[in-house]
Image (spheres, rainbow, N blue to C red):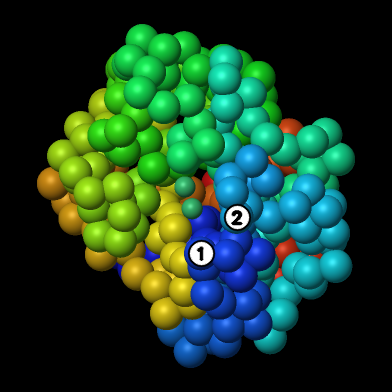
Amino acid sequence: MRYLIDLHTHTIASDHAYSTIHDYIRQAQESGMLMFACTDHGPALADGAHQWHFHNLRVVPRLADGVAILRGAEANILEDGEIDLDEASLGRLDLIIAGFHPCSPQNSDAKAYTRMLIRLIESGRVDILAHPGNPRFPFDYETVLECALEHQVAVEINASSSVNTRMGSHDNCVSIAKIASRLGNIVSLGTDAHISYFLGNFEESLRVIKESGLNEALIINRSPQAVLDFLERRGHPPIPELRAHFGQSQA
Ligand SMILES: [Zn+2]
Ligand SMILES: [Zn+2]
């Protein structure tokens, strides 16, 4: 299956990324992508976006040149599962993904990272766990995925892990995908593009899906409706413009 929705991208709002929203829109048009989420890094990262970036994302159109844009953030996981987005940001975003980064607690053990992830999931503040296969931040996959399932938080299969960054993630991603498939977790695909040309390049995610035998019905990127259904179930307000454009759920 070809996935036409990318739920994890970065723009020049993060200095180590190199494309604008316009570049992504053009790339999406050229490659037939239907939707992407703009998910720049939270402010705790050295070159993350300012809180105001997230407050003002409402000026970004829902649809531009036929491409749907979700207003998102990739928050940084801090001590005790806190994240670095203020309430104003959280209330204005369509989706919040969160992951461990250089500003997260370093060199903790799996027990500590498991505790942070459980706290984060239980807080209700995050929709998607970003790049969970990162070997630098080990955790108890079974325990965290059970908690994610209970709270309907999605687990990401990241297409940049083991390709552009986070080398050594691949086998962990396969293990996580196997558990997700067995438990029935919600799964999200994100390229984590830091330049527009990588938008929708899910080669590594597809390798993980194939090797793990993941049930692709669990993947929300299968349709725009599945993404919108997921976000509404997570408690985000409906997005009428996108519902009108893509139609109601087929489920
Ligand atoms: Zn990340
Ligand atoms: Zn990212």
Side of 78 relative to 43 (left or right): left
Q: Is residue 214 above or below residue 24?
A: above
Q: Residues within 10 Å of mark 1 (few under 14, many from 20)?
A: few
x, y percent for residue 138: 30, 25
Give the camera-side residue of 245 and 203. 203
Q: Is residue 219 above or below residue 61?
A: above
> Residue at label 1?
16
Q: Residues within 10 Å of mark 2 (few under 14, many from 20)?
A: some
> Residue at label 2?
47
x, y percent for residue 71: 70, 57
Residue shown at the point (71%, 80%) measured from the top left: 64
Number of callouts:
2
Residue shown at the point (55%, 51%) measured from the top left: 226
x, y percent for residue 39: 60, 55
x, y percent for residue 191: 41, 60
Q: Is residue 128 above or below residue 140?
A: below
